[in-house]
Amino acid sequence: MTSKDMLTALDLHPVDPLPEDTAKYFAICEEKLGLVPNVLKANACDIEMLNAFTALYNKIMLADSGLSKLEREMIAVTVSSENKCFYCLTAHGAAGRELSGDPILGEMLVMNYRVADLSPKQRAMLDFSVLVTKASATILEKDRQALRDVGWTDKDIWDIANTAAFYNMTNRVSSSLDMRPNTEYHSQSR
């Protein structure tokens, strides 16, 4: 496998053959995204782990929420920026550019969300996400209240915390295993 084709620094490969449900899921990804994300291919070395990962991802990123899909991607990018996760910055940076239709906003989120022209509600969401990332044990009621004060509900705060925590976990796995993003992400929505 060349470095271009590398999924992670580990010599792991998707099970072969893929179970029928997994093969169908990968075909849907290929149809909708034009690719199968490397994070899915990497997790396909353990189908139970892949299924758990995709179930949690789908719940956090795609289920009904007071957070828009873009806002969830904004959290993913901001957390990944704090953690310097190459895989997630590349993949979710592309998603943020696509969903916002604004490549400059996408780059600002990757580099430093604080320079972006965000609503007070979105800025508070990202400030809280960074606090979850850097010092979750220090979060107090005043921090949750700051989110309520700009219009987030308690269920939204739950979703913000879970989204930030999910990306903190995936960032650590991706970084520690040198997971590589699909090359297609680098040029998307620019």
Image: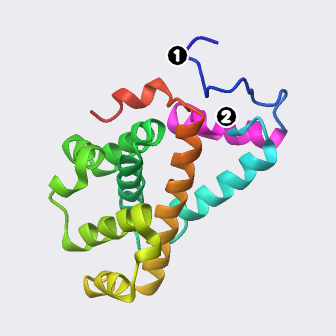
- Residue 162 percent location from the top left of the image: 52, 68
Residues rendered magenta in the picture: 20-42
- Helix, strand or loop for disc 2: helix
Quarter holding the C terminus is top left
| Structural crowding at the residue carrying mark 2, measured as other residues with C-alpha within 10 Å and reported as few (<14), some (14–19) or many (≥20) | many
Q: Based on the picture, tell me whether residue 32 belongs to the magenta stretch.
A: yes
Judge by depth and name the residue closer to the eye, 121 or 180.
180
| Structural crowding at the residue carrying mark 1, measured as other residues with C-alpha within 10 Å and reported as few (<14), some (14–19) or many (≥20) | few
- Residue 113 percent location from the top left of the image: 24, 54
Q: Based on the picture, tell me whether residue 44 belongs to the magenta stretch.
A: no
Q: Residue at the spot x=40%, y=61% of the render?
A: 134
Q: Is residue 85 left or right of residue 150?
A: right
Q: Is residue 23 left or right of residue 132?
A: right
> Can you see residue 158?
yes
Judge by depth and name the residue closer to the eye, 18 or 80.
80
Callout 2 amino acid: Ala
**Overall secondary structure of the magenta section:** helix
- Residue 24 percent location from the top left of the image: 73, 40
Q: Is residue 44 left or right of residue 84?
A: right
Q: Which mark is residue 182?
A: none
Callout 1 amino acid: Lys
Which residue position is annotated with label 1? 4
Which residue position is annotated with label 2? 42
- Residue 2 percent location from the top left of the image: 58, 11
